[in-house]
Image (spheres, rainbow, N blue to C red):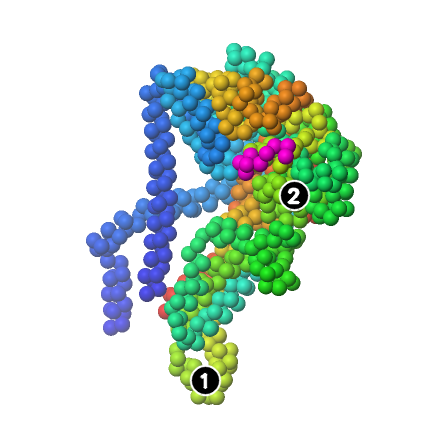
Amino acid sequence: MTVAVKESRRRKRFRFDKDKAIGLALVTPSILAVMVFVYGFIAWTLRVSLSAWKGLLPDYTFVGLDNFRQLASDPRFHIDVRNTVIFTVVFVGGCLIVGLGTALLLDQGIRAEGFFRSLYLFPMAISFIVTGVVWRWLMNPAQGDRISGLNLLFDKLGLDFLVNTWHATPGWGIAFVAIPAIWQMSGYTMALYLAGLRGVPEALREAARVDGATELQVYRKVVLPLIRPVTLSALIILGHISLKVFDLIVAMAGKQVQLDVPAIYMWTTTFDGFFFGRGAAIGIVLLVSVAVLVVPYLAYTLRQESGQ
Amino acid sequence: MYRRKGLRLFAVVAAFALIAAACGGGGGETTTTGGEGTGTTAAAASEVEVFSWWTGGGEAAGLEAMIKVFNEKYPNIKFVNSAVAGGAGTNARAVLASRLQANDPPDSWQGHAGWELIGTYVAADQIEPLNFLYDQEGWLDVMPDTLIPLISKDGNIYSVPVNIHRANVLWMNPTVLSDNGISVPTTLDEFFTALDTLKANGMDAPLAMGEQWTSMHLLETIMLASLGADGWNSLWDGTGDWSSAEVTKALENFAKVLDYTNSDASALSWQDAGQLVLDGSAAFNIMGDWQEGFFRELGKTPKTDYDWAPVPGTPGTFQFLSDSFVLAKGAPHRDAAIAWLTVAGSREGQDAFNPVKGSIPARNDGDRSLYGEYLLSAMDDWASNTVVGSLTHGVVANDSWKSEIDTALGLFLSNKDVAAFQDALVAAAAASPNQ
């Protein structure tokens, strides 16, 4: 009996009808395009990263891992890695804290929740370039007569201790560049958390309250553990944005080594300096670092889905 | 549910891929049209495609003025203006690189005269020598002798300079100087004394500087002041020694000059830095002479609101940069391209372009009635001074070399380590020499 059912199901899955034929025909061009424009170019970039290509015209002379070895001892790339780590920690940490905080506040059943939700989510509709330009003005590091932006505001409010040099701070400027990024993406993180919070059954909270848990305990022991998968998703999404950050920094600070990140180095060395081999090597390093972050997550979610 | 979500995601990705494909297709179509144009016009020579990054402001207006001259002289050749927007040509050069790699060159394109062109396009065998045109038009007689080697390789001249800008200019606020009893400094020592006086009188940052490329501009002028014209030239033609004590001294001078600059430099553009001089919050700014165009745009009066002099230590030397046009090897419309270059190098063409752009003609026979007070002084110096090339603006070093120097400079700005800076410069010179 069960065998027969399974058999019929399997047959059903493999039946090839007109709808499926049309569907396949419709997605085939996309599949081909993805094969060429995504995977084809990844393969090509890998080839270039192993080549001695420097100059306008392609030179595919194989040099093994030379480009990667040079990056490992390149002081500018060391700055890039350091900057990326600082940016990622501040940006992801900031987004998670602000996002979770605002989500918890919005979850208290306040009035005009829809209004606040949109308000916090709106910055996400802006591109990083625009955010960068606006925050470049806001975080103008000038002081004295030329004080402006946030520094001027702090000065007028008598909050002099908050006046600082922002992204022009030697060594730690990149941490300040993360502030606009947090401003932009924490609303999105909030939306993720809010969806998670809404998914926690009221019955569980009730049960905890009946057992005598305080509101704080309800959150710490019941709600937060249940939305841990949301934190993981947010971590992955924000993390890969952070590794690839480019436009925000270029818009805020132009091309300067102190605020350099791998994506900017890749761009300048390839198109300003014609070091195509080195640029491709940086691209591969970026790809691998994002893959290290994303692939385990994809594997995890796929397993979860097939489990359901 | 999950599966459907997955499908939707896939659909979005696929849609993007399709858009990308469509864009690629569009580009291909344009190319085909160009190809057809080639077929029909090769005989009639009725078209010339000129590629530049002049899309706005005085540059675009200057180009238009020069196109007008071209249209009057060659009414049967259609001028196709393929300008790509983007600061200092970064985007345009990427577009040009992909067109050249696809073997689809424009007839002529814009580039900074010198090694930015030679190192990239001569090395890749993409442009033709223009000695025949220089001979035919008599340009060698009207351009400075010291200019020609800087835009040549192995005796071949590769581009037609349309305009000349001067890099080694010190911009000053005359009121600030007279209030502090300072006369115009002509040597580095006088410059340091003046800066010390201003600092002692309470001006924290008497020398205004902007973002990283403006510090490279400052570096090259201070190096020129320290090394002299011959010493500077020798660093680029392979005869000089980057590890010498003279270079160490030059870099130390640069490090010292940096002590007098504003702490928020990295957040300022070159215009912002110029504004500081106008406002009197700084006394000096070292910038190319496009700064004058900015001052005039603001309605400021020369010699009253601002004054100028060669960078201390460099009087008698004209550190130049120039926009120039080349002849593509295998240009689809070679004759028309040569006609365009003839106009670009002519007195009429240059006098149409330069007053609008705010630069001086590369020829020394420009119509003096068309130029303002500063530009006239620059024209006099251009005709009489020793001409040397600018690093920041593409004359003396190929792009790979320059980008390595830029990296070394960026590292130096954060760690201020002169020895490491010099080591990096030595390594950059060894890895990417001009050849």
Q: Position of residue A299 (x, y in %)?
A: 45, 61
Q: Is residue B90 left or right of residue A111?
A: right
Res. A71 image quadrant: top right
Q: Position of residue A32 (x, y in %)?
A: 35, 45
Please determine whether, in this image, residue A58 is positioned above or below residue A179.
above
Mark whose residue sits in front, 1 or 2: 2
| Residue closer to the observer: B214 or A17 | B214
Q: CA distance from mark 1 to mark 2?
A: 69 Å
Task: Mark 1: give few (<14), some (14-19) or many (20+) Cα within 10 Å.
Answer: some
What residue is drawn where x is 62% and y is 37%? Answer: B305
Q: Position of residue B16 (x, y in %)?
A: 37, 48
Q: Which dot marks residue A136? A: none
Visible residue check, residue B273: no
Please determine whether, in this image, residue A176 is positioned above or below residue B339.
below
Mark 2, secondary structure of its residue: loop
Quadrant including the N terminus of chain B = bottom left
Q: Which residue is mark 1?
A: A208
Please determine whether, in this image, residue B381 is positioned above or below residue B421.
above
| Residue closer to the observer: B359 or B302 | B302
Q: Which residue is mark 2?
A: B280
Q: Which residues are magenta?
A: B296-304
